[in-house]
Image (cartoon, rainbow, N blue to C red):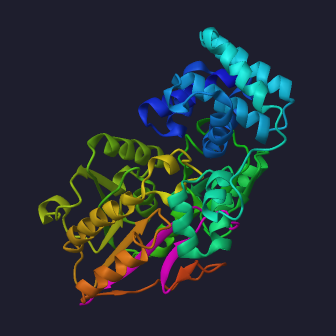
Amino acid sequence: MTGRALAIQVLARVARTDAYLNVVLDALLAEHRPEDPRDAALATELAYGATRRQLALDEVLSGASGRALGKLEDRVLAALRIGAYQLFYLRIPRHAAVGATVEALKELGLGRASGFLNAVLRKISTLDALPLPPESEVARHLSVRESHPQWLVERWIRQFGRERAEAMLAADNQPAPVVVRANSAKTSRDVLLAELTGMGISARAAELSPAGIVLESPGALDSLYGYREGLWQVQDEAAQLVGIYADFPQAARVLDACAAPGGKALHQAERHQVVASDLHENKLSRIASEAKRLGLSERISTFAHDATQSFSEEEVGEVQAVLVDAPCTGLGTLRRHPELRYRRQEADVGRLAALQARILEAAQHSVPPGGLLVYAVCSTDPEEGMDQIQTFLRSHPDFSSEPPVLELARPLPLVQGFLRTLPGPEGLDGFFAARLRRAF
C-alpha cells in the first residue's frame, strides 16, 4: 500500500473508531509494512499533518466541494484532507499532489469517487493561499489558521494572553520530538547518550530533564539500541520532569493511584518500591510487561482499583508517598495527539476537574503523617491544575505545598512552587504538578 493510501486508511479509521491517531498509524504500518521506508514516512507526515490542520483544510474544502463534508464517506473525506494538506502545506507539485491522491483512492477500491475528488482538488489547487476569516475576528481567525476549536483559542487568550496563546497554538502544530528517559536502574543518561551517538544515532541531551535524551529521526524504536536491553523508556521531557519534581525520599514506598500507561510509575520504580493501580486491568498488564523489559519487575506490583474510592490498607500496605497522575483533558499534549483537540468540548474541563477532585480526596487518605502527595495532569488549564490544588488545600489544612530542593543544571519551571510547563518555543508538552506534604 502506498503512503497516501495508508494515510487515507489511518484518518478514516481514527474518525470511525475515535481511536488515537498514533495507535492506528502504528497498527496499520505494522500490518502493511511498506517496503520503501519513504512510504511509511509519507503516511506519517500526511496523517499527522492533515489532522493538525483539519479546521483550515475543511474551511477550503467546504467552499469547494458543494457537499456537506460530514456526509461524505470517511475515506473520501480523508482523501480530500490529505490532498488539500499537500497542496497548501507541502512542497509537492500541485499536479502530482492531485494525481497521486486520486490514484491512492482508486487503490483503496473507491474509483467511483475519484472524479469528485479530482474535481475538488483541482479547484482548490488554483488558490494561492488558504482562505481565512478576517484578522479583526481574532479568535475565529486563529481558530481556523491554527486549527484549534474556537472555544479553546478564546480560553487560552483569556488565561495566558494573546502572545503566549499564539505560541501555544503554533507549537501544537509542530511534530513532537521523540524523547526517551534513561533507565537509571541500569545506566545513566551520559553513558547511554555516548553509546547511542557512538553508534551513529543522532541524539542529544534534553534541556531540562537530567534523564532525558532527544532522538532525531530514530526510525523503529523497538529496533533501536537499548530497547531490548531495557536501557530506556519513551517519555516526553515534561512528563519526566513530574517524576523529578516529585523527589520522593529514597526509602519511600510509593502508591501510584492512576498508573496507566505507566511511564511515571516505572520512572519511580527505578528508585522506589511502587504499588501501581489503575481502573483497567488490561492496562496494568502492559505496565507489567514494560517493567519486565526494563528489569523493574521486582520493584513494582499492580492491582485494579477505582481511584475515586479510598484505598484499603490491605490492598496497598504501608506507603510513604502517593502519586496521582489524574485523568484530564490532555490539552497539554495536542501536538502528540492532534485528534484530541476536535474531540474535547469546553464542558469537559469542568467534568474532568470534578473527577480529579474525587480522586484527590480518595488518595489523600493513603498519605501518612509527614508523607507526600504529588498531583499531576497533562493539561494547560488552571481549573485542572492550580485552581484544583488551591481548592484542595483550603479544604485540607493539614496539607501544605512543599516544592523540592534539587541540585539541577537547569532549574525546573516553577510557578508559586508548582511545576508548570506550557507548549511553546521551549519544546515541551503542557503539564502541571503539585507536591504536597501532610503535617506530622
Q: Evaluate whether residue 188 shows in this view.
A: no
Counting from the top left corner in percent of width and height, residue 59 is at 64, 42
Residue at the image point whose x is 61% and y is 79% from the top: 408
In the displayed structure, 40 sits above or below 239; it is above
Figure quadrant of residue 18 = top left
Residue at the image point whose x is 62% and y is 61% from the top: 212
Q: Evaluate whether residue 149 shows in this view.
A: yes
Q: Is residue 432 magenta?
A: yes
Counting from the top left corner in percent of width and height, residue 87 is at 78, 34
In the displayed structure, 129 sits above or below 413; it is above
Seen in the image, is 41 located left or right of residue 151? right
Counting from the top left corner in percent of width and height, residue 385 is at 42, 72
Figure quadrant of residue 149 = bottom right
Magenta segment: 416-440
Residue at the image point whose x is 74% and y is 26% from the top: 121
Query: Which residue occupies the foreground of this view, 288 or 354?
Result: 354
In the displayed structure, 277 sits above or below 115; it is below
Seen in the image, is 405 located left or right of residue 208? left
Quarter of the N terminus within the rendering: top right
Residue at the image point whose x is 65% and y is 33% from the top: 81
Seen in the image, is 153 located left or right of residue 353? right
Counting from the top left corner in percent of width and height, residue 181 is at 57, 57
Count of numbered tags: 0
The residue positioned farthest toward the right in the image shown: 93
Seen in the image, is 201 located left or right of residue 414? right
